[in-house]
Amino acid sequence: MRPEPGLYVTATPIGNLADITYRAVEILQKADLILCEDTRQTAKLCAAYGIETPRAPYHDHNAAKVRPEIIKKLQDGAVICLVSDAGTPLISDPGYKLVREARNAGVAVFPVPGASASLAALCAAGAPSDRFFFAGFLPAKPGARAKTLEELARIDATLIFYETAPRLSDALAAMAQTLGDRKAVVARELTKLHEEFREGTLSDLAQSYEAAPPKGEIVIIVFPPDEKPAEAGDVDAFLKAALDELSVKEAAAAAAEQFSMPRKEAYARALQLKENS
């Protein structure tokens, strides 16, 4: 069955060729055209899955020129897939401009989700994942990089960066200087044969990679700033509410988890509040 006409934003593998969904393969096989960041790179994927759909380049250097032609094909009922060299399109690439213009032109846009290096690194790094901020690539020039990091330092969340191997040590050192010497994880060559997760402080990781520069594609996960000590009033308010329904032991355990405080300290405070109630 022919897919519904429109633009299909299609995720491709980030390393292991098996990291692709059945739906993505089917859409790529049945599309009229595949827009590629690099047609040579996408050709490897197509060869692996018997995809014979025509391919055309869509990247930073030709995007503005070819977008009107692409939009016209979509308005005429074409099924077009947009892919990047690896992972989910629009993450650190110019694809969002095509999506925006397609939507403005009344063209249907469909996500075909799959692999993403940033999320793959986050889910295996052990950093808090309830709040995170994707910062992409930092500027190459030291001044611009420092300014960007100063802005990011105010964000109370896990930070996710992409970085190139030659710039890794300098980037980590700059992060340590501006963000503070936070805990971090460098994820390299995700889902490939030499996949690596290396954990440490930003300064330690900077020194490590300065001594032995890495190879491959890299994601940096920077943990949030150290949590501020819990205010006594906040803890008491939490415990009082908890004690209405829970035992002293249960309320203390809940408070210890909520405020990252010692259970013994939480229990002593809960017991005192219970006795004074």
Image (tube, rainbow, N blue to C red):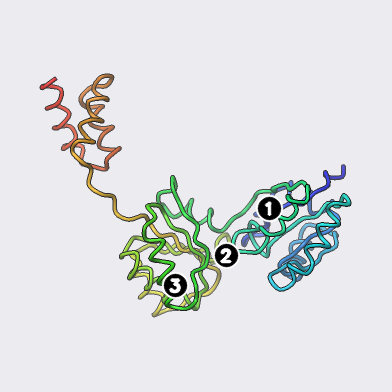
* Number of other residues with Cα within 10 Å of mark 2, as a class: few under 14, some 14 to 19, many 20 or more: few
Q: Secondary structure at mark 2?
A: loop
Say what amino acid the circle numbered 2 marks.
Leu
Disc ID at residue 20: 1
* Residue 173 percent location from the top left of the image: 37, 73
Point out the tag, 2 or 3, that comes first from the N-terminus.
3
Q: Which quadrant, please, contains the C terminus?
A: top left
Say what amino acid the circle numbered 3 marks.
Arg
Point out the tag, 3 or 1, that comes first from the N-terminus.
1
- Say left or right for 47 vs 134: right
Q: Is residue 81 above or below residue 164?
A: above
Point out the tag, 1 or 2, that comes first from the N-terminus.
1
**C-alpha span from label 3 to label 1:** 34 Å
* Number of other residues with Cα within 10 Å of mark 1, as a class: few under 14, some 14 to 19, many 20 or more: some
**C-alpha span from label 2 to label 3:** 32 Å
Q: Is residue 230 above or below residue 85?
A: above
Disc 3 target residue: 145
Tag 2 near tag 3, CB within 8 Å? no
The structure residue drawn at horizontal position 68% and vertical position 53%, both measured from the top left corner, is: 20
Disc ID at residue 193: 2
* Residue 240 percent location from the top left of the image: 22, 25
